[in-house]
Image (cartoon, rainbow, N blue to C red):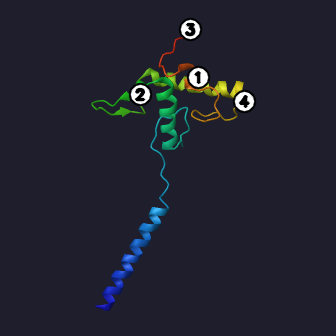
Amino acid sequence: MKTNRKFIVAVVLIVAGIISVAAINPSPRGNNFTNLQVLPKDISPAALQHIMVDEFQDGLGVGCNFCHAQEKGSLHLDYASDEKPEKEIARAMMRMTMDINKKYFEVEHPLIGDSVMSVSCFTCHHGVAHPDPNE
């Protein structure tokens, strides 16, 4: 009986140790983002969320469905799809913004959403999807 009790205590301690190590050092996981053509392929979910909300949603006053198509037969969005032309326009605008910041403001490695960017989506859009070119 004493041997069984020692064995059970040892197993519980080993399992607790394994769970503790797993909780402290979670295994690194890659993102599942596909079809990133301008943004870095290794972008973190938090950085991507920041760009999508702070740059696009706030800068253009649009929601995700402005650029992202709906999955066929579903209410979910297909973030990898290039079905909507607005997505390619957004890519061109990101490239343009990074080029402006690099050429005119000497930002060495411009990245959308970075605080060193002098020109951002909001610079021209002011929270409007289609800004008035006369303003």
Q: Amino acid at mark 2?
A: Gly
Of the residues under marks 2 and 1, which one precedes in the sequence? 2
Of the residues under marks 3 and 1, which one precedes in the sequence? 1
Residue 129 horizontal/vertical position (percent): 47, 19
Of the residues under marks 4 and 1, which one precedes in the sequence? 4
For marks 3 and 1, give the CA distance. Answer: 14 Å
Of the residues under marks 3 and 4, which one precedes in the sequence? 4
Determine contact: label 3, label 2, CB under 8 Å.
no
Element type where label 1 sits in the image: helix
Question: For the residue carrying disc 1, how many other residues have a C-alpha within 10 Å: few (<14), some (14-19), or many (20+)?
Answer: few
Of the residues under marks 4 and 2, which one precedes in the sequence? 2
Question: What residue lies at 41% left-to-right and 30% top-to-bottom?
Answer: 81
Q: Which residue does the numbered mark 3 point to in the structure image?
A: 134
Q: In front: 39, or 49?
A: 49
Q: Amino acid at mark 4?
A: Glu
Q: In front: 48, or 84?
A: 48
Element type where label 4 sits in the image: loop
For marks 3 and 2, give the CA distance. Answer: 25 Å
Question: For the residue carrying disc 4, how many other residues have a C-alpha within 10 Å: few (<14), some (14-19), or many (20+)?
Answer: few
Residue 26 horizontal/vertical position (percent): 47, 59
Element type where label 3 sits in the image: loop
Tell me the tag on residue 63.
Answer: 2
Q: Which residue does the numbered mark 1 point to in the structure image?
A: 123
Question: What residue lies at 68% left-to-right and 28% top-to-bottom?
Answer: 102
Screen quadrant of the N terminus: bottom left
Tell me the tag on residue 106.
Answer: 4
Q: Amino acid at mark 3?
A: Asn
Residue 130 horizontal/vertical position (percent): 48, 16
For marks 3 and 4, give the CA distance. Answer: 28 Å
Front position among marks 2 and 1: 1
